[in-house]
Image (tube, grey):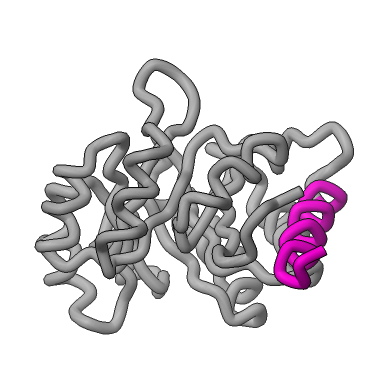
Amino acid sequence: MISSPDWRLCLVTPPEFEPAAFASLVARLLAIGDVAALRLRLPGADPRQISAAVAALAPVTRQADIALLLDGDPGLARQLGCDGVHVAPTAVRAARSVFGIDGTVGAACGNSRDAAMTAADDGADYVAFGPVIGDDAVMRETVVDWAMAMLVPCVVAGGLSATSLPTWATTGAEFLTLGRALWRATEGPETMLRAVLDARRKAARGG
C-alpha cells in the first residue's frame, strides 16, 4: 500500500509515440484521477516532431487543467504554448528569463543536493531527483532531507514503478513521476494508473 497521501503524481511521456494515438491514451488516463503534470520528453526529436506532439497533447492537458512541460528547450516550449520547461540546473536562470514569472521551470538535479540548491537559488519552481535505480541512483535520504528543510518542492523521477512507489511516497516529496513503467505495464497503463491512484486515496483515508 502507498503509505503517505501527501504527494501528487506526474507523468513523463515515452521517448517516441504517434501523437494522435498517444493523446487519446493520455485523455483516458487523465479521466481516471488526479495527475499534476505531463512532461514531454522526446530525446533526439526535431522541432517539427515536438510541435506535432504539443499540438496533440496541449488540448488534452488544458481540458484536464494540468501542466504540460517540455524537456530541454525553453524557447521552443514558450513558442509552442507549453506551460513550462524541465531543464538542467545550470539552465534554470536562462529558462526563467524566457518564461518570466508565469511559466513553470523545473530542474533535473540527478542525485545532487548541491545542484538542487543552485537550481532553487536561480528560481526553479521545483527540483527533480532521480533516477531511483542504477549506479547514479539518488539516495532516499537526499530526498527526505530536502523535503524536510527546503520550501522549493521536489519531484522523484526516473525508474519509479508501482512496486517502488510506496518507498518514495514516505520521503515527503511533493510529486512522484511515472514513465516507462506505466507505458509498459503488462496490465495496461489505465489499469496500473487506477491501482496507483486507488492506493493513494486509500492511504489518504487511513485505510
**Position of 129 compared to 162: left or right?**
left
In the picture shown, does residue 199 fall above or below 134? Answer: below
SS assignment for the magenta stretch, majority: helix
Residue nearest the observer in this picture, 152 or 81: 152
**Position of 46 compared to 188: left or right?**
left
Q: Measured from the top left, where is residue 92 in percent x and y?
A: 17, 58
Q: Is residue 131 magenta?
A: no
Which residue: 60% across, 73% down?
Answer: 61
Residue 28 visible: no
Which residue: 33% across, 59% down?
Answer: 148
Which residue: 70% across, 35% down?
Answer: 163
Q: Measured from the top left, where is residue 34 in percent x and y?
A: 68, 71
Residue nearest the observer in this picture, 137 or 23: 137
In the picture shown, does residue 33 fall above or below 195? Answer: below
Residue nearest the observer in this picture, 124 or 26: 124
Q: Is residue 194 magenta?
A: yes
**Position of 126 compared to 193: left or right?**
left
Splitting the image into 4 quarters, where does residue 38 fall? bottom right
Residue nearest the observer in this picture, 119 or 67: 119
In the picture shown, does residue 125 fall above or below 196? Answer: below
In the picture shown, does residue 179 fall above or below 79? Answer: above
**Position of 194 compared to 121: left or right?**
right
Q: Measured from the top left, where is residue 110 in percent x and y?
A: 31, 37
Residue 96 visible: yes
Magenta stretch bounds: 190-207
Which residue: 55% across, 71% down?
Answer: 58
**Farthest residue toward the top?**
135
**Farthest residue toward the front?**
206
Q: Measured from the top left, where is residue 85 in percent x and y?
A: 33, 61
Quadrant where the image shows the C terminus = bottom right
